[in-house]
Image (cartoon, rainbow, N blue to C red):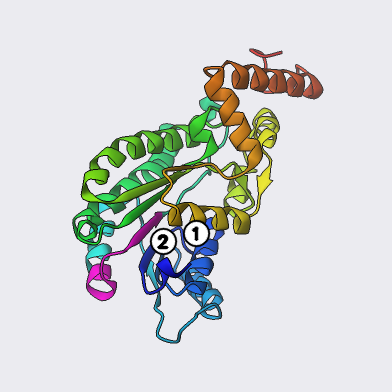
Amino acid sequence: MKRFEGKIIYITGGSSGIGLEMGRIFTGRGANLLLIARNEEKLGKARQTLEKFRRSPTQLIGTLSVDVSDINDVEQKMKAALDVYGAPDVLVLSAGINKYADHFENITPAMFDEVIKTNLYGPRNMIYTLLAAMKSRRSHIVILSSAAGLFGMFGYTAYGTSKAALLGLSDSLRYELKPLGMKLTVVCPPEVDTPMNLDEVKTLPKEGRAVKSLAGLLTPEYTAEGIVKAIAGGRYLFIPGAKTRLLYLAHCLSNGWLTRMTSDAVIRITCKRMGNKTAAGCSGHC
């Protein structure tokens, strides 16, 4: 796709997972990249990984350590980035955490705030800081939400809230960007095999694990390829994975009844398998 050749692309969460895979694809198509994440060591390794996919020795692959949840850090670092790289033609907002997938009563206010600040305020902070510079380039904004933003899931009161809020942000922001000639793509993948799962697995209840499995597991490579195609095609909403698209269709056609009924059934069966005495939090379902 020649449309990415020579373009400037910023990717938050660019040191691993979907962000890194998108970086690989964009590098192979001649784009100039700025990978953004918090961990400098991981960013360095990501840059080394992408070096071999360059189409030209003049392509830029830069890295920048930024805490997207901190508006002061974002404003300071993005000012420097604009001076060095220029405004992005494509801004990919992939940074996110899911450290606290658990029963609601186990998620403290501080935990909830941490998820919201990274997953919701992070994209908001980046867009707010860069929007003025992106207007003249008619840049394309890409927001990674989640299937958990399309419909609720057991154990996802923090993560699901943050991702559903991103859909609200995207829907509203799209109307403001369109008259400016700017496009927005919001992506809602199911579970993707990324390092974030290592945090989630520590606390995710078995009921949540069972419900989540309904949509299947995608690879970062497959997901990233689909997202890049969606960007190139100017799509607004992109849902990777046939199972997730089918679930979302059923959800919309039944006004949520079918997906709620299916999830309730899966939770009830999971509780019975665990046994009422050992299934923490199952009393309301079993």
In the image, what residue occupies the spot 75% across and 24% down?
Answer: 270
From this view, report whether residue 281 is shown above or below residue 43: above
Is residue 8 found inside the magenta-colored segment of the image? no
Q: The magenta stretch spans which residues?
A: 80-92
Q: In the image, which disc is placed on residue 19?
A: 1
How crowded is the residue under tag 1: few (<14 C-alpha within 10 Å), some, or many (20+)? many
In the image, what residue occupies the spot 37% across and 42% down?
Answer: 120
From the viewer's perspective, is 170 left or right of 115?
left
Specify whether residue 153 is in view: no
Element type at mark 2: strand
Element type at mark 1: helix
Q: Position of residue 4 (x, y in %)?
A: 42, 67
Q: Are marks 2 and 1 in contact (CB under 8 Å)?
A: yes
Q: In the image, which disc is placed on residue 11?
A: 2
In the image, what residue occupies the spot 59% across and 36% down?
Answer: 245
Q: Earlier in the sequence, mark 2 or mark 1?
A: 2
What is the CA distance from the residue labelled 2 to the residue labelled 1? Answer: 6 Å
Front residue (pair 259, 77): 259
- The type of residue carrying mark 2 is Ile
Front residue (pair 283, 165): 165
* Image quadrant in which you'd find residue 102: top right
